[in-house]
Amino acid sequence: MSARDAILAGIRRGLRRGPLPPAEAAALDERLVAHRRNLVPARAAALDHAGRIGLFVAMAEEVQTTVARVASAADVPNEVARYLAAENLPADLAMAPDPALDALPWDARPLLQIRRGKAEAGDAASLTPCLAAIAETGTLILVSGTATPTTLNFLPDTHIVVVRADQVVASYEDGWDLVRQRGPMPRTVNFITGPSRTGDIEQRIELGAHGPRRLHVVLIDDGAPIA
């Protein structure tokens, strides 16, 4: 018996329920394999790839995400340096220890101080890759792993995310497909839509309430893999 089966069996015992009848068990197994989709809005699904990218940018900007489109992966270091300077932030970066990010030409911006690893309390800005970007809502999907510590998504005040054009998909269902295709389910899947925010008692939006107050996307238009 797997650990999952042991946990579920313990729950069933606690609820005083016996084993599922074979027909119900088979139906559940089929549903888990098929991943039946819910209704997907046509405004994203009906678009071509260029249209999905345009919708993602528009929806991301609606929720105070800033987006910079660059022609190639080689332009990412210049855009990161430009953004930090424009926001009057230190040229210091906590970066995910991701091989694709490491392959970028960071030596073109020697004044950038880059530390690879999980975020620490004093980090002002972080840089991460993402798994997918959802056109429907301007949402980013980030998964945890040794090369993508989740602390980078939430601890620094400024979060910069590199997105390839070919990572932009129409809907959440498309994003979950990519999560499943990558292999074993990660410990954490984060759906990030804009900077952290909350509304106070007077219904004024405050950014940075529970995480970054700035979210900046560097969108690589050529769609080619970074590495």
Image: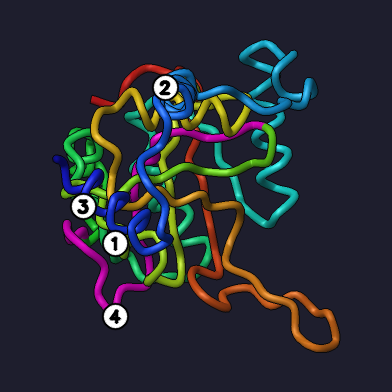
Q: CB of mark 2 within 8 Å of CB of mark 1?
A: no
Numbered range of the magenta stretch? 114-135
Q: CA distance from mark 3 to mark 1?
A: 12 Å
Query: Is 168 above or below relative to 117?
Result: above
Residue on which the image places disc 4: 122
Q: Position of residue 104 (x, y in %)?
A: 24, 35
Q: Nearer the viewer, mark 2 or mark 3?
A: 2
N-term mark: 2 or 4:
2
Q: Position of residue 148 (x, y in %)?
A: 25, 49
Residue on which the image places disc 2: 26
Query: Is 222 above or below relative to 25?
Result: above
Position of residue 28 in the picture relative to residue 18 (left or right) = right
| Residue drawn at the location 36% of the way across and 71% of the way down | 90
Q: CA distance from mark 2 to mark 1?
A: 50 Å
Asked if residue 71 can be seen in this view, the reply is: no
| Residue drawn at the location 55% of the way across and 40% of the way down | 68
| Residue drawn at the location 14% of the way across and 40% of the way down | 1
Q: Position of residue 214 (x, y in %)?
A: 54, 64
Residue on which the image places disc 3: 110
Q: Position of residue 106 (x, y in %)?
A: 22, 43
N-term mark: 1 or 4:
1
Q: Badge 3: how crowded within 10 Å, few (<14), some, or many (20+)?
A: few
Q: CA distance from mark 2 to mark 3?
A: 59 Å
Position of residue 69 in the picture relative to residue 103 (left or right) = right
The three-letter code of the residue at mark 1 reads Leu
Q: Is residue 210 magenta?
A: no
Q: Nearer the viewer, mark 3 or mark 4?
A: 4
Helix, strand or loop status at disc 2: helix
Residue on which the image places disc 1: 93
The three-letter code of the residue at mark 3 reads Pro
Q: Badge 1: how crowded within 10 Å, few (<14), some, or many (20+)?
A: many
